[in-house]
Image: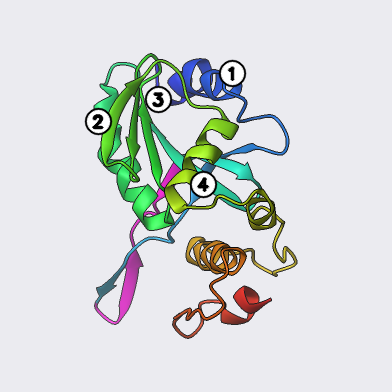
Amino acid sequence: MTEADTCRKFVVPALQRAGWDAEPHGIAEQRTITDGRIIPVGKGFVRKPPKRADYLLCHQRNFPLGVVEAKGIWKSAGDGLQQAKEYAEMLGLYFAYASNGPEILEFDYFTGKESVLAAYPTPDELWQRYRAGRGIKDDGAAAKLLTPIHTAVKKGERYYAQIAINRAVEGIVQGILRQLLTMATGTGKTAVAF
């Protein structure tokens, strides 16, 4: 059984049972999060393979809450946890999951605890944990945070632009009116501003 078989037979059905595949929630599969490191070679360069998250757990289209790294059933779920944590940190997420099918491990960045789970949390459970961890008590502010952002960007948002947008909106709905977003040249500042 390959890793893809493990995903198809175990991981995706477990995510679906938890409700991640029911609108407005979603499972973003095989999401590329970096283009790959550039290595200079002579007068040119070679690009290393991109980093790709197996699954992003999205409460809404533009609001991921967690990342899942799947490994083949012959491996331990713990073999993927460090990779899941790396991707969660890159994406600014607070929940990292690793699974080999039967085993599910969770790392919660709010508590700093690693747990073995019998099933994935539902989208609403994870959303409530996120709100508690970020201190979002007002239901109106939480609803505004999930309001879709400008989606007419030519190439789509890069992961860091999406993080910047979500964090800025989160600050605004919590009443933080002065915020500074620092982004490099060519990273899509205009799209983020929209």
Magenta stretch holds residue 43: yes
Q: Determine whether the residue tagged by mark 3 lies in a helix, strand or loop.
A: helix
Instruction: Spot the residue most to the front.
Output: 138
Give the mark nearer the N terminus: 4 vs 1: 1
Q: CA distance from mark 2 to mark 4?
A: 29 Å
Magenta stretch holds residue 86: no
Residue visible at 72% across and 63% down?
Answer: 151
| Amino acid, disc 1 | Arg
Residue 57 lies, with reference to residue 21, above or below; the image says: below
Residue visible at 54% across and 47% down?
Answer: 64
Give the mark nearer the N terminus: 1 vs 2: 1
Q: Which residues are magenta?
A: 42-54
Labels 2 & 3 near each other (Cβ < 8 A): no
* Image depth: mark 2 or mark 3 in front: 2
- Residue at image mark 4: 131
Q: Is residue 91 left or right of residue 124?
A: left
Give the mark nearer the N terminus: 2 vs 3: 3
Mark 2 Cα-neighbour bin, 10 Å: few <14, some 14–19, many ≥20: some
Q: Position of residue 80 (x, y in %)?
A: 30, 34
Q: Position of residue 117 (x, y in %)?
A: 37, 20
Q: CA distance from mark 4 to mark 3?
A: 33 Å
- Residue at image mark 3: 3
- Residue at image mark 1: 17
